[in-house]
Amino acid sequence: MISKTLRGVLRGASAIALGLALTANGALAQTQERTVVGERYIPTIWVDPDGCEHWVMDDGAEGYMSPHVTREGIPVCREVNLCGVVNTDQLFATDSARISGQGKQRLREFFQQAGAVSYTIVGHTDSRASDEYNMGLSLRRANSVAAVARSIGASIADVRGYGERMPKASNATAEGMTQNRRVEILCWR
């Protein structure tokens, strides 16, 4: 025999499943419908910064593209390597994220020959300005390089700006600062 409390819970669950709700006195009341606004899903394929290819369909379902999986069913993702380092002094004027025509041509040639599935572009600066400013400048420069890559149809997995936070050399010397002003291009194969 079902207890009175359990019967009430089951009746309430059934009513809610039908779009109805119980009022305080136990009477059923119609609940208002509401529309949940979400983001629009666009069918696409991309490579995450971890090197795994993903897909998303119209209904928002997402999955891995890689046909290669381990015995446990975990996708085997692509390997990444540092395939290009460009000293930003060669591409950009001081305090600028605008690439010269000659610089754009060199970058186009690089991306056409690199042959990677996707790229991650990472910008770096020296320590002469504030951390906040350097973070913005490094990201703007990385985005400029990514724009050149996209202009020839290259797939960009990610664009990052680290400012002065990941120096390659000491910022105490002019030579060290020159080495730190760079854009790194990571190739996903």
Image: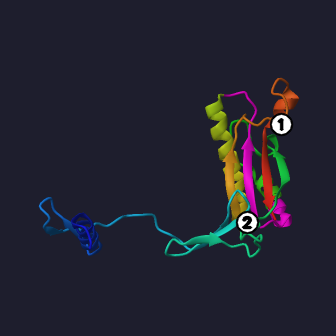
Cα distance, mark 1 to mark 2? Answer: 27 Å
- Any magenta on residue 110? yes
Amino acid tagged 2: Ala
- Viewed as shown, does residue 12 lie left or right of 166? left
Residue for point 71% across, 71% down: 73
Q: Amino acid at mark 1?
A: Lys
Residue 41 image point, x, y percent: 50, 69
Span highlighted in magenta in the image: 109-129
* Residue identifier under label 1: 168
Is any atom of residue 98 visible in this view?
no
Residue, disc 2: 154
Residue at the image position 65 percent from the left and 46 percent from the top = 140
Camera-nearest residue between 152 and 75: 75
Residue sitting farthest toward the right: 175
- The local crowd at label 1, few if under 14, some if 14 to 19, many if 20 or more residues have their Cα within 10 Å, is some
Mark 2 closeness class: few <14, some 14–19, many ≥20 residues within 10 Å: many
* Labelled disc at residue 3: none
Q: Tell me the residue at 73%/36% (across/down).
A: 94
